[in-house]
Amino acid sequence: MATTRSARAVAVAVLQLAVLLSPPAVAAGAAAPLSVDFHAASCPQLESIVLSSVQAALQREIALAAGLLRIFFHDCFPQGCDASVYLNGAGSEQQEGPNLSLQPRALQLVEDIRAKVHAACGPTVSCADISALATRDAVVVSGGPSYAVLVGQLDSLAPASPDLVGDLPNPSTASVQSLLDRFTTRGLGERADLVALSGGHTVGRSQCSFIRRPPDDDFSRRMAANCSVNPSVLQNLDVITPDAFDNGYYIALNKSQGVFKSDMALIRDRSTAPIVRQFANDKAAFFKQFAISMVKLSQVQRTGGNVGEIRRNCFRTNGQSLADAAASEEGFAASS
């Protein structure tokens, strides 16, 4: 197929939500607006495939919920929800400091779901969309609120720059204002957004290297003691109900049982402490704001707009996949 014909076919397919019968190439212009039913015609089985896959995965390992949430945040915050964090290899975001501890099994789960979706519908759904849907379903399956997911994102052709990845909030940050300054650049400048999205820690765990230091109360001293005995131990970020998506994280903060400095900053700052106390006392209020803030996170402005491709492997671009295949064929020919 000629290059111009291929580009025209892709544009028509994206804009009219038609079933893509051949692998899509780089979008030549603006993609169709995102919507909750973007894939209704091209992949009606999409949401049921994602939900059943997430349910089965979380039954085996509930920690995957936290893994998916963290990956989604680390993907969307730097340059929008474009699945750039899934790219691996030299120069990838996964090699940057904030992403070194991303959960490999959660990354693989999204790729496994992509394979199922593409087997059922062809290459019509991006890794970015699958990641967003899987994250929402992981929240719901672990007890949290549902919320609308706007789909129709294309996968990026390159990772985010180190500078953009470096904008990810640091758990060692003790200042609410410094956290807000970063959130504001992504359209998340409301204090309620910061407090609600931090509530994703309700199903998270931390390595010892991230816990707050120096110890300044009984709780932090116990954490430090546990880590000195077993440096590989994982600390629950919600010590009340660590495996359930609820408001236990905020109840723990009210008891000064925050694991990160950034957690304790929320209860120690007079501008965010009332929100923490509200969420601790009213799970429904937390759920409502979390849903609002997750939708806002999913709409962080993408650098250059919604352009890219639908990857046939979440861990590499389609161009990389073709290069890998060509290299494999050359290697086989040389060894024959």
Image (cartoon, rainbow, N blue to C red):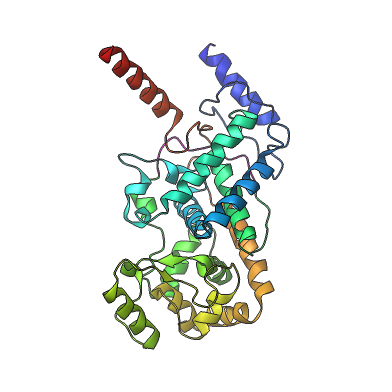
9 or 20: nearer the eye?
A: 20
Among the 4 quarters of the image, the one containing residue 130: top right
Residue at 65% in and 75% down: 283
Farthest residue to the front: give it: 60
Residue 290 appears in view: yes
Q: Nearer the viewer, residue 278 or 236?
A: 236
- Look at the image and give the residue range highlighted in magenta: 150-159
Q: Residue at x 44, y 66 (%)?
A: 205
> Is residue 55 left or right of 239 when viewed as pictured?
right
Whether residue 153 is in magenta: the answer is yes
Q: Nearer the viewer, residue 108 or 174?
A: 108
> Can you tell which quarter of the image residue 74 is in?
bottom left
Which residue sits at x=41%, y=63%? Answer: 169
Given residues 180 and 47, the one toward you in this image is 47
Q: Quadrant of the C terminus?
A: top left
Corner quadrant of residue 103: bottom left
In the rendering, at what x and y percent does residue 144 appear?
64, 64
